[in-house]
Amino acid sequence: MQGTRSTAHDIVAGVSMDVLFAGVPVAGFAAAVDWYTQLFGRPADIVAHDTEVMWRVVGDGWIYVVEDADRAGRALVTIAVPDLEAAVDDVRARGIDPTPIEPVGASGLKSTMADPDGNTISLIEVRNA
């Protein structure tokens, strides 16, 4: 059943899964919250406590930013968007400067940026081959 779609949730290796949380550890919590607020164009959807906030990125997919200086700067997050050029323009308009759009493989495009701690956030567009 691996990878099979269920009506209520996904089944992976026989385990039901409902929600994805991707963690981004940071050392400078206040600066990170400001940066991700700029990135997403809105305040966090949930403030879990004084050192953890969450944004719903898509459906049941969330990014949470948590103060964890020992792990800060090591996250790699990729978010697929339907129109990369529009997404990059939107992010730039909010004061974040992603890299130029580059091809990836035969049908992808990618642009990357780093938060104040060096965590890498990429935006990708995958075109039908």
Image (cartoon, helix red, strand yellow):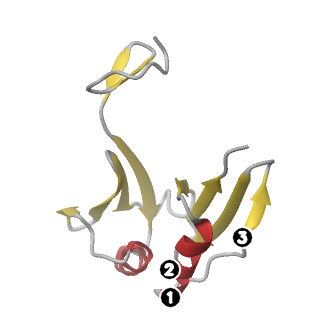
> In the image, residue 87 lies at what x, y percent?
53, 71
Give the quadrant of the C terminus: top right
Residue occupied by mark 2 = 90
Q: Secondary structure at mark 3?
A: loop
**Residue projecting furthest to the front:** 128
* Among the 4 quarters of the image, the one containing residue 67: bottom left
Classify mark 2: residues with Cα within 10 Å, few (<14), some (14-19) or many (20+). some
- 112 with respect to 27 (left or right): right
Q: Nearer the viewer, residue 102 or 37?
A: 102
Classify mark 3: residues with Cα within 10 Å, few (<14), some (14-19) or many (20+). some
- 88 with respect to 13 (left or right): right
> In the image, residue 14 lies at what x, y percent?
39, 12
Disc 2 to disc 3, C-alpha distance: 14 Å
Relative height, residue 106 to residue 85 (above, below): above
Residue at screen point 39% across, 72% down: 40
Residue at screen point 45% across, 15% down: 13
Residue occupied by mark 3 = 101
Query: Residue 93 has which mark?
Result: 1
Disc 1 to disc 3, C-alpha distance: 16 Å
Give the quadrant of the N terminus: top left
Disc 1 to disc 2, C-alpha distance: 5 Å
> In the image, residue 58 lies at what x, y percent?
37, 53
Q: Amino acid at mark 3?
A: Ile
* Among the 4 quarters of the image, the one containing residue 111: bottom right
Q: Amino acid at mark 2?
A: Asp
